[in-house]
Structure formats: C-alpha cells, structure tokens
Image: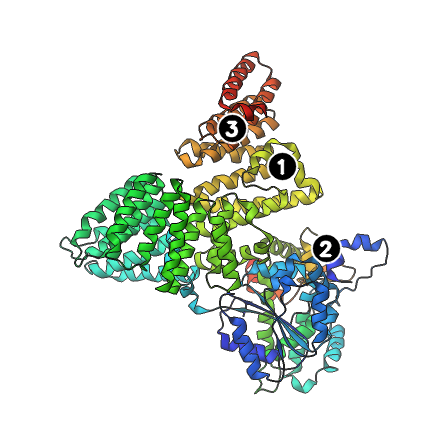
Amino acid sequence: MWGKPVDLKSQLSRLNRILQQPLFRFIIVQCLPEYNTSFEIKASLEKNFPDRPIHDDIKLSKITYPELLEEFEKLTEGFVFLHRFEALIDNPDLYSGFNQRRDRFAEKPIAILAFLPVGVRVLRKTQEHIPDFWSFRTAVFEIKFKYIEGLIPSFFWDFREPPPNSNTYQDKLSAQKSLIGQLEEVPTNSYELRINLLEEIAINYKDLARFSEALECIETGLISFPPSSAAIDKKINLLLTKAAIQIEQFNEKEAQITLNQVDNLLPQLTPFDWETWSTLQKYQADLLLQNRDNKKAYEFLKDKLKEASGNLEATNINLILLKARLGIALMQMGELSEAKSLFESFDSIKEKSLLLSVDARKVACKVISDINSIAVSLIRFELKNTLANSDPYFPFIQLSFVSLFGKGRVGYLKKDEEESGFFEELVSRFEQYYGPEHPLVAEVYFYQAIKDYINLTSVSSFEDPIDSYLFPQKRSLIFKNLKRKEAIIMLSELDEKFFRVARIFEKSYTKNSIKYIISNIYRGYIKFLKGELNDAFLLLHNNYKWFEGKKIEDYTYINALNSICVGKVTEEMNRLQSAIFFTHDGIKKFSSLSLDFKNNFHIMILTILLGEIMKEYEKPAVIRYFKRLFVRIKQQFSPPLYRQ
Amino acid sequence: MPLELIPDILLIKDYAEVVFFHFIKIREKEDDSPIEATIRRFQEFVYKRISPDLFESENVVREAILHSGGSFRELLRLLQNTAYEADINDRQITADALRRAIELLASDARILTEKELEILKKLKENNEKRLVTPYMDGMFRLLEQVVIMEYNDGNYKRVNPIIEKSEIYKQYVG
C-alpha cells in the first residue's frame, strides 16, 4: 500500500476483496512499468473471477473521448485495464469526458483498473486533471518490489554515476550507519576486515555523492595496510575508487598520480588481472578525453584495445566501455561516421549475448548523447524501441534522452515523450535510489525545470535566456497568453525549482557544478522578469565571481552568457557603468570562443547593444572606445554576414 | 456541477445561480465536541444501508461518522474500505478494520505539497484561536480534494479528520 512496501500477494488479495462484487470500481494501480504487474493482476483476476471478462485493449494515448465511450457502450461487465493512464493528462477532450460524464462510466458494473507509473508527482497530476472522476476512486495501490536492485545494470552507469550497491537511498543510509558501527567494533589489528569495511563505506559515500568523506575513508584504508601486506588487489581497488572520485571532481593531476600508483602495483598481481587492467585504462582514457587530448586518447585506446582483444572476451563490458571511449575520441575529433559505425558495431555482439548487446547499445547512446547530435537518431530509435517493447531499461534511455535534451536540442522533446510522463517517473525513480540531495537527482530536476521554463516562455532553445534578456519582444511572450499575476506565480514556482537544483549542485563540486551556474542564470532571468532586479544582480554576480576563480575552457560560453546577463540587469537598474563593464566582459569572452556563425552573430548584436548603452552614458571617451571596438568586431565578420 | 468547472465559477454565475452544499457540521466549531443530533442522523443513514449486526459495535459506526467530517460520500468510502479490510472470518466489521482503512485513506496526504501543509497548519492555528480562515492561494485544490472541509456558510473550515491521521500531517502540522 502507499508508503508501505507490501508484497504483491497481500496486495492482490486485497484487490480481489475489493473486486468481489461485480459493481463499478475505479482502482488506481501504481507500479513500475518494466515489471509486468498488470499480467500478475490479470492472472489473479482470471483465476478468481473466471466468469468476468478482462478488456485489455483500450489505449488512452490513441483514443478520443467519443471512441472511448463507444468502446464502453459495447461492454456489459468485467474489468477494463487502462494502461498508461497518465496519457489522458495531455488530452483535454479525454479528461473533461472523465470528469463531466463520470456517470457514463459508473453506471455499469465494470471495474476500471488504471495503471500509472510510481511516484507522487504523476499521481498528483492525474488527480488534478480528473478531480471529479478521482472522487469515485475505490482504492489506490502502489506496488513496489524488493528486487528492484537488479534492474540497474551497473555498467550502464559507468559514464555517469556509480550504481547503488544496495537498494534505495534509505537502505543505503541505514547500511552505511551499520557499517560504520561495525568498523568501530573491529580491532585495529584486524587489517583485512577493517580495509574491507572501509572500502565498502567509501563506495557507499561515493554513491551518496559525499566525495570528501569517501576520500577520507580511502585514505584511512590505504594507511591501514600492514607493511608486509599481500593484499595488492584490495589496495588497487581502493586506489581505483579514489581515481574515479578525483576524475569526477576535475582533480586531474591528483587522479593521474593515483593511476600511476595503480600502474606500479598492477604487475604484482598474480595471476595478472585483465579486468583491473582494463579499468585502469578506462580511467586513463577518461583523463585524456577530459583534457580534450583527443588524438592522444584515440591512439592510446587503439593501442590498449589491441592489447585487450587477445585477453578479454568480446562481450566483456570493460572492453565495450573502452570501445565506447574510442567512439568519443573519434567524435571529438570530428570523425562522426567512423564513430557511428563503431557504436553500431555493438549490435554484432548480439549473437553472442543478447542482453549485453542491448546494454552496450544503451551505453553507446548515453555516451554519444553527451557529445554529438548524431545521437539524436539513435536515441529516438532506442526510445521508440524501448517503448514498444516495454523495455526494462526504459528509464535509463529516458535519461539519455533528457541529457540530450539538456544539450540544447529542446526541439526533440516531442509530445510523444512528454505524454509518457517520463520526468515524473525519472524523478521518482532516482529519488528512490539516490535520495533527494544527489547530483544525479538534481540533474533530472534541472532538465525538468528547463522543460517547464520552455513551456512557460515558448522559447525553442536552451541558450535562449540570452536572447530573452536582450530582446523585450521575447520577454513579452511569457505574458502573452497569461495574466501578469498568473505569470508571476508560475515564474515563482519555476524559480523554486531552479533553486532546488542550484542548492544541490552548489554543495558538490563535480562536472555537474556548471548546472549550478546555469540554474542561477535562469533564476536571474526569472527575477529579472519579475522586476526583482537586485536579486537578479546578486545571483548573476555570484556566478561571475564563481568563474573568476576557475579556468574551465569548456564553460566559456556560459561564462560569457552570464556576463551579458549581468550587463543587462545592471542596465535595467540604470547602473550604466557596470552595464558597460559586464557587457564588454561578455563580448570579450564570446570573442575568445571559436568563431562560428552563432557567436559572430551574438558578438555583433551585443556590440550594437553595448553601443546603445554607451550612447545613454554620453561620455565622449567611452563612445570613442566603443567606435574602436566596433571597427575591430566588424573586421571579424565575413562580408556576407556583416551585410546581412 | 463538475469540480473541474469550479475555477470558472464567476463566469457560470453570470448565467446561472450556483448553490453550494457545504458539509454537515459534525463537531462544534467552538470546542470541537461531537454534535450528537447529527451523529444520530448519520447513524440512521448508515443503518438503512448496512445492518447494525454487521458491525462489531455501535462505536465502530460512531468513529467512522466522526472521521467522515460530515460528508456522506466520505463516510461511505470509509465504510467501503473498512469492509475490504475486515477479516472474512470475523464476519463483522471491526474497530481494527476501521483503523486500517483510516490508515490507508490517510495516505492520500502524501500528495500534499509543503505549501499546502503550511495552509493546513495555518488553518489549525486559526481554528485553535477561533479565528475565521480566509480563502488562501492554493486552497482551491485542498477544497476540491476534500482535504479541507467547509461548513456553515463556508466560514468554518477544518481539515478532513482522515488526513489528520496521516504521518505527514502529524509531523508537519502536529
């Protein structure tokens, strides 16, 4: 039942009691879509009520209200299964029908079983759309399963976050408490036991994204080895976990030192362990790729793959992950077709191991979704495929999709995907595994907030805050279909969502920390729209300071964007000198990016706007400076673009 | 009128008269004491539909009525769920089954947001101080979902007694 994990048997028994009488019933069943709960329920109903037919062929996502009624008219008794009940959320015709003519459904001795994904959000959203029909509900079941752990293929997470090694976040917390308790009781001379426990605690901390505590445990573990220890494998494992955290935290130099230590210890392993060897190579490749040493990474991986291929099975996951990294290197080098065929080659593994090939494709999707647009077609294909086959890995494909969407290709978040309520499902699933404060959960919150932002502002691109800051007509879009008061309420809600993301990312400095900054840019924009200029300035200026202490080339674009935003806010505040300073800073940062059409276009627009601010400022020296700058910018553009 | 049209009530009022049927007050506003006359009328309503012999004691019915908050539909829903929870071997609807049904229905509260819990907290405080709680932003959904129940002319509001039994309510509102 709700909030209480109860086994399926007792839930089915309650369901059977509720359905005993052949009367109208409206039952909501929340369950994980990948597990065939509906089959279990169907089997149970067939056994207990053999005379009552089960109608299982109505698809809410593909039916209109009149068609639904027509289907219902044909029925006289039995059970109706409505899968993906949340599909009605986006169909006003359908949910109004459920509300306004609920009597049409209730007048027949038919039990409706509506299936929803697990989670509060989807439940609430459905309830909000069908308040009338909802009041007819007989019961709500939430079916949870203990073996959920097995649903996460650990290697799939290799490119993102470590897999949880126990069931849910709560389980992990209590396991951690008990492990720490055990550690306190272990005598200091029980080296092996202490090190085993420390390793387990460190991995748990890593899973909980509490990196500094994880590193502390590893260090304690490393100094706990007696001088003549033969447990090289343990030491190597601890060091590899340490390296993974250091890579995650951008501590590349320290990560390299740790990997060198592993490299030195590796020959002492008897017999030689190719699995550990390949893990080491994986991290070495990550460092090269993170530094954008693509060519070096490519050669390194080619070399290592050659060495590995004689010693590891073709279906070995570490081998596949090395190949996936080779794919990334190729893509970063611009060799897209070669990368694509490499990822597609994972399909050939199918003959040897069907399951692994499916996962390998998903790994490939995940990886390329982070990098390049060629992922679009592959991921769309996978998404369609997994939807059609009720694939158990659907949530992970969804995350790939979300990640892709986060890269700015918001246009790909089409209605089909929205209908599936996948954000709700993702949030609920990840909250359950990782807890509410984990960066991975925040990542889903982040994309969800961006999606809401896009829905509210009707913009079409991830980079649009800059355009919206600059062009009042874009800003007015928000208020176009909404009363100002409504818009303010919606903006405040959105602000809270971004705040939640920013708060989580602020705490842990990882690759994802940039989302803290991006969230603040969105928050700044929201405050700007609401007329809260001081708050907007504080947020964006805080971002500006954040960038000052860091040299992260990859984020120059965001850095430039932020400066432009501060410029715009200060201009609005009539602090023209600051506006000039920040706008100019933004232009400089844009100019340092590789030149492509978009940046040129931005620089041109921004320079014109800077000129506008300067005109207001009316200081001849400033205007002279602007003129010089404009001439320089003009020279950067190709003639056709400039004429345009 | 369907609940989904309530947000458009001002528009509807231009063309039709809208009459509200509030819930029947089952506890006094002043001291929260049960109103016996109302309880008797509700008992009559129950016994006309379910034989008194099917209940373990009269007190089960009384408790169910008090938990209905004065809503016939809520009462029937609660009794229906109590019947599902009843042990078939008992052949009676027991206090224990009622307790389990209340627990199950109280889990509706898990959908409440922090803002909504704040509203419930404010409502409780006002009721304790015997102050009238005005309509607040976000209250509409709570009324629509019978988390808050309105009595008299709508000036007396209180939280659905079943929601009061939920853990989240107890933790947040107290």
For the N terminus of chain B, give its image quadrant. bottom right
Q: CA distance from mark 2 to mark 1?
A: 36 Å
Q: Position of residue A151 (x, y in %)?
A: 42, 64
- Circles 2 and 3: CB distance less than 8 Å? no
Q: Residue at x 71, y 54 (%)?
A: B133
Identify residue for label 1. Answer: A529
User: Is A439 placed left or right of A481 in the picture?
Assistant: left
Q: Chain of mark 2?
A: B
Q: CA distance from mark 3 to mark 1?
A: 27 Å
Q: CA distance from mark 2 to mark 3?
A: 62 Å
- Disc 1 residue type (three-letter): Leu
State which mark lies toward you, 2 or 1.
1
Badge 2: how crowded within 10 Å, few (<14), some, or many (20+)?
Answer: few
Q: Residue at x 54, y 50 (%)?
A: A448
Q: Chain of mark 1?
A: A
- Disc 3 residue type (three-letter): Asn
Same chain letter for marks 3 and 1: yes
- A489 vs A106, nearest the viewer: A106
| Label annotation for residue B132 | 2
Badge 3: how crowded within 10 Å, few (<14), some, or many (20+)?
Answer: many
Q: Is residue A400 visible?
A: yes
Q: Chain of mark 3?
A: A
Residue lying at the far left of the rendered structure: A228
State which mark lies toward you, 2 or 3.
3
Residue B12 placement: quadrant: bottom right
Residue lying at the far top of the rendered structure: A620
| Label annotation for residue A600 | 3
User: Is B43 placed left or right of A622 in the picture?
Assistant: right
Establish if B100 lies above or below B126.
Answer: below
Of pointers 3 and 1, the one earlier in the residue sequence: 1
